[in-house]
Image (cartoon, rainbow, N blue to C red):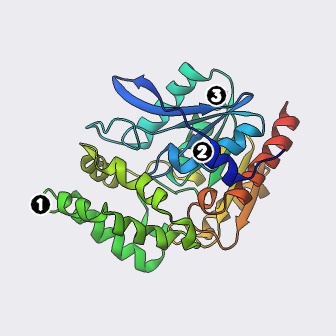
Amino acid sequence: MTLTTQQLVTTTYFEKLIWTWRNHKIQYTVMGTGQPLVLVHGFGASIGHWRKNIPVLASAGYKVFAVDLLGFGGSDKAPIDYSTEVWVELLKDFWTDQIQQPAVFIGNSIGALLSLIVLAEHPEISAGGVLINSAGGLSHRPHELNPPLRIVMAAFNRVVRSPMTGKFVFNRIRQKSQIRRTLYQVYRDRSAVTDELVDLLYTPSCDPGAQQVFASILSAPPGPEPKELLPKIERPLLVIWGADDPWTPITGVKIYEKALENGKDIKIVPIPGAGHCPHDEVPDVVNAQIVDWLAQRLEVRG
């Protein structure tokens, strides 16, 4: 019997495991057996943001790993300078210690960018990638934002980085009511913005050091652009994009369309009526796309 996403979510317990990386505690979970998949969350999120995907992918015959990046979720809020390089090194070392066979890296937002970097810089550890509303950088470049958001984000970043106002602003924006309002901006279906989802984002923000992590990331260099990485990609890609995303607009798929025209193995799937996190907002749609693509592409490569 095939269970629905909701049945799998409500009957599944995610075991929280700890891996030590450079003397820092990294939380992760693993479920299932088979070809390894590595799920990489976006900014402010955690392995819990994949709660509607992990059991479905595992039940489809895959060994699913999900990692809380350093600074997020149940992982340590280390007082370091955060960058894409730090997290890519973390993912590569996690693969070396825990997986040790080519994996498909699946990411949302910043997690999608990190997955793309892994595929470009460490092809030996990857079998493919699934990019869900991929960010163009660790911090937004102005040309990636809609005009009103450019002004808002520029001012917001200045305030957050200020020693005078940073803590005050962080304490305001991490309030549950504000988190819910932010989610309403990026989820088209407001019924998907549940108390559970709000708690997933709120709870780690209460950890010591969370405000410093937040400020460090907002002031970090954006890292490589996807258009710089795509020429290096030799693995198949599935690019999923919630078409109503105000943060990373659907126009972001153009570089992947161009790469497809240039011969790269890329499948592009826009999802109408979904926002920045379609894997959580419309999980049945996204899970089906991923499972079908994995069956086709891994069989072809195998």
**Residue 144 position in % (x across, y down):** 50, 67
Circle 2 residue: 116
- For the point 35% across and 42% down, the residue is 82
C-alpha distance separating marks 1 and 2: 36 Å
**Residue 212 position in % (x across, y down):** 25, 47
Q: Amino acid at mark 2?
A: Leu
Circle 1 residue: 164
Q: Amino acid at mark 1?
A: Met
- Among the 4 quarters of the image, the one containing residue 19: top left
Specify few, some or many for label 1: CA neighbours under 10 Å numbering under 14, 14-19, or 20 or more. few
Which residue in the rendered view is the most extreme toward the left? 164
**Residue 6 position in % (x across, y down):** 67, 54
Question: Residue 220, which numbered label?
Answer: none
Specify few, some or many for label 3: CA neighbours under 10 Å numbering under 14, 14-19, or 20 or more. some
C-alpha distance separating marks 3 and 2: 12 Å
Quadrant of the image containing the N terminus: top right
Tag 3, which secondary structure? helix
Looking at the picture, does residue 50 appear above or below residue 140?
A: above
Which residue is nearer to you in this view: 276 or 176? Answer: 176
C-alpha distance separating marks 3 and 1: 44 Å
Which residue is nearer to you in this view: 247 or 188? Answer: 188
Circle 3 residue: 125
Question: Does residue 56 appear in the picture of this structure?
Answer: yes
- For the point 48% across and 76% down, the residue is 146
Which residue is nearer to you in this view: 290 or 224? Answer: 290
Label 1 or label 2, whichever comes before in sequence order = 2
Q: Amino acid at mark 3?
A: Ile
Which residue is nearer to you in this view: 192 or 109? Answer: 192
Camera-side mark, 1 or 2: 1
Camera-side mark, 3 or 1: 1
